[in-house]
Amino acid sequence: MKIIILHGDDVIGSYDRLAKFIEIAKLRNWETYKIGDGNLTLTEALSSGSLFQKEKLIILENVSLINKITSDWINKEADNLDATLVIYNQGIVDLKLIKSLPKNTKVEEFKLKSYIWNFLDSFYPGNVKNVLLLLNEVVKKDPVEFLFTLLVRHLRDLYWLKIDPKALNYPSWRLSKLKRQASRFSEKVLKSIIADLADADIKSKTSQVDLKDSLDFLIATKLE
């Protein structure tokens, strides 16, 4: 059995890679299973035989489904299984999980550029000038839609830290960094910004507003 982990903060890059695996599987006429779509568990999908003796691609997007019992079973049965398992995660997979899988597991991490992290980390009240400068730098190199998606996800993480910290399955170093940034916001302000971003997203898709202009306005008014 082949196991491939696709993870990292560049969720668009990792998702494009996942889509490529699915596309290739279809071209090769493989059977594709997405864990969570039906009644099959991960172990059932891996161990079940193909009706037509086809290759199998199994996609798992919920890493929490891999507990100790499952990882032990995979390690024990890996050599006897004829399938390709792609584990996809929006964000960084905990190193403990990676180490719990067979040693020949292939790991592909999709990292964000440092200038994008600089923008995301600088996004907090009282830092308007710096955030606007960094925003202008980023959109010179990357589509504003890409940055917008990352910002929404980042702010949702900060909000979850406010209301339910245990909901985020990130490495401890990442959680510590997010907590420091989240402490600069009130829950009310975060909720308001996320709502404004959702509104801007809808209006930009119906050509009512320019997404970059919306971000400029939001930063100037919400982070003052």
Image: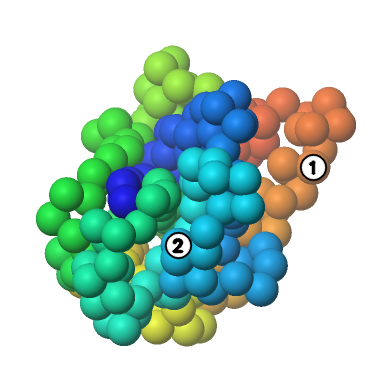
Q: Is residue 161 above or below residue 223?
A: below
Q: Which sits in the foreground, 145 or 199? A: 145
Residue 115 % position (x, y): 29, 31
Residue 153 shows up from this direction: no
Name the front one of labels 1 and 2: 2
155 on left or right of 145: left
Cα separation between marks 1 and 2: 40 Å
Above or below: residue 221 compared with residue 180: above
Amino acid of disc 1 = Ile
Residue at position x 30%, y 60% in the image: 80
Q: Residues within 10 Å of mark 1 (few under 14, many from 20)?
A: few
Question: For mark 1, what is the residue?
Answer: 202
Amino acid on which disc 2 is placed: Leu
Q: Position of residue 78 (x, y in %)?
A: 27, 61
- Ranked by sequence position, the earlier of labels 1 and 2 is 2
Viewer-closest of 18 and 110: 18
67 left or right of 44 in image: left
Q: What residue is rendered at 50% in x and 46% in y?
A: 57
